[in-house]
């Protein structure tokens, strides 16, 4: 794998739950250029699910007119992932990031979305503006099989 | 030859959803096989090469195993 | 499937040949919501390959700074696909569409890209501006779910 290689893509789609699976596949297919292990891909898919579900359910409250944007960049063996919406935004980001915190307990969601993203990725950063939208910026190094040999 | 043509045609009319499920099963089997053989997790490319498809196709097929919408569902299933 | 259902996505990526397979799978994953047959999806993937390759090779002449945009929309059982670049553009579109015409005979390309797109899709339309870029707009009805057993 060429360490200096760069690549990028941007994906936008309607905030519909049908597109969650599509978004997972798109990001995973893009990152598969770095030759991740099967498990690294599964982790990334989970992270994409959590972030996209949040935009659809919380950001747009299920309004399919909303648009979710995912940007992915590859630089060497580092993947940068940004998941954004122009939805309602988060009033208190620090509170929202607490494990088990959820503003929709009626949906039986676990409140673990942000915790999962934070744990599965190397870097994780939330920017949000009430009424303006939310942006999640994450990075992960794809160690592939290199680390498995030493 | 007519037989083969009919077979090929039938295969073409196969639904993508079913074809993906079959590929997903092959991917899972190959992943297990390679894990034992290599004594580590295979990469997406290694599985793809063994199956003669692209890494992107492997990732797409994997999705057909209908993974839960989010991890909560796995945990609380 | 609900006939009135609508969905859309837009994908942008670097004009690198590594992204051709990624673009094919992304479009296939999006359209697979309509549960097409293997034939239908294979045709669509081929069409995406031809259009994306043209943008990379002819539009941007291999310059990876170029950006290729694919928009896809689903309305009922109709898929609309637009593949665009902001590259060199085509001087004579009618000539370019002729079977076997190619401006790069040295690459041993077949000159059949446009012919394939035209034949595999129900509608096919090229707009191009010299120095401004090229846009290919195509439509296809996914008939599978009605005509065939599952
Ligand atoms: N994109 C978003 N737009 C608005 N609010 C959000 C967004 N993402 C997360 N939140 C807020 O942060 C909380 C915690 O998110 P998360 O950890 O994923 O748990 P859950 O989704 O199960 O509620 C949500 O309940 C919601 O209030
Ligand atoms: N996106 C594009 N930008 C500029 N020129 C293009 C583009 N797509 C096609 N062309 C022109 O049209 C010709 C015919 O395209 P095509 O039928 O795909 O054949 P081929 O790619 O094998 O040359 C190309 O040789 C090129 O001159
Ligand atoms: Mg969540
Ligand atoms: Mg061509």
Image: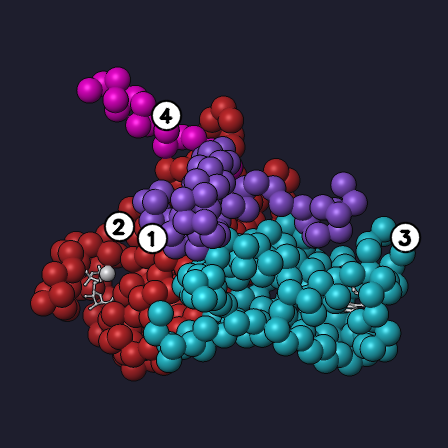
Chain colours: A cyan, B purple, C red
The CA span between labels 3 and 1 is 45 Å
Q: Nearer the viewer, mark 1 or mark 4?
A: 4
Asked if residue A53 lies in the magenta stretch, the reply is no
Q: Secondary structure at mark 3?
A: helix
The CA span between labels 2 and 1 is 7 Å
The residue stretch that appears in magenta: B1-17
| Discs 2 and 1 carry the same chain letter | yes
Q: Earlier in the sequence, mark 2 or mark 1?
A: 1
Write down the quadrant of residue B37 in the picture. Answer: top left
Residue C12 at x, y percent in the picture: 46, 69
The residue carrying mark 4 is: B10
Q: Classify residue C53 as left or right of residue A48.
A: left
Q: Residues within 10 Å of mark 4 (few under 14, many from 20)?
A: few
Q: Residues within 10 Å of mark 1 (few under 14, many from 20)?
A: many
Q: Is residue B27 visible?
A: no
The residue carrying mark 3 is: A106
| Discs 2 and 3 carry the same chain letter | no
| Rendered image: mark on residue C116 | 2
Q: Is residue C39 visible?
A: yes
| Discs 3 and 4 carry the same chain letter | no
Camera-nearest residue between B36 and B30: B36
Residue C48 at x, y percent in the picture: 36, 56
Residue B66 at x, y percent in the picture: 60, 42
Q: Nearer the viewer, mark 2 or mark 3?
A: 3
The CA span between labels 2 and 3 is 52 Å
């Amino acid at each position: 794998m060429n360490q200096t290689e760069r690549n990028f893509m941007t994906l936008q789609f309607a905030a519909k739950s049908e597109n969650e699976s599509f978004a997972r596949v798109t990001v995973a297919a893009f990152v598969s250029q770095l030759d991740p292990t099967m498990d690294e891909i599964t982790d990334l898919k989970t992270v994409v699910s959590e972030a996209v579900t949040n935009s659809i359910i919380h950001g747009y409250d299920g309004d399919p007119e909303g648009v979710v944007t995912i940007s992915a960049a590859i630089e060497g063996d580092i993947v940068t992932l940004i998941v954004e919406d122009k939805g309602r935004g988060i009033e208190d980001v620090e509170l929202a990031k607490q494990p088990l915190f959820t503003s929709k307990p009626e949906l039986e969601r676990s409140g673990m979305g942000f915790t999962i993203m934070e744990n599965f990725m190397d870097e994780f950063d939330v920017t949000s503006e009430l009424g303006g939208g939310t942006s999640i910026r994450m990075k992960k190094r794809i160690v592939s099989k290199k680390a498995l040999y030493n | 030859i007519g037989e083969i043509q009919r077979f090929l045609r039938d295969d073409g009319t196969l639904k993508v959803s079913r074809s993906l499920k079959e590929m997903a099963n092959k991917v899972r089997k190959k992943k297990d096989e390679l894990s034992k053989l290599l004594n580590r997790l295979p990469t997406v490319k290694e599985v793809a090469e063994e199956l003669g498809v692209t890494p992107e196709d492997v990732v797409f097929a994997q999705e057909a195993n209908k993974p839960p919408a989010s991890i909560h569902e796995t945990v609380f299933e």
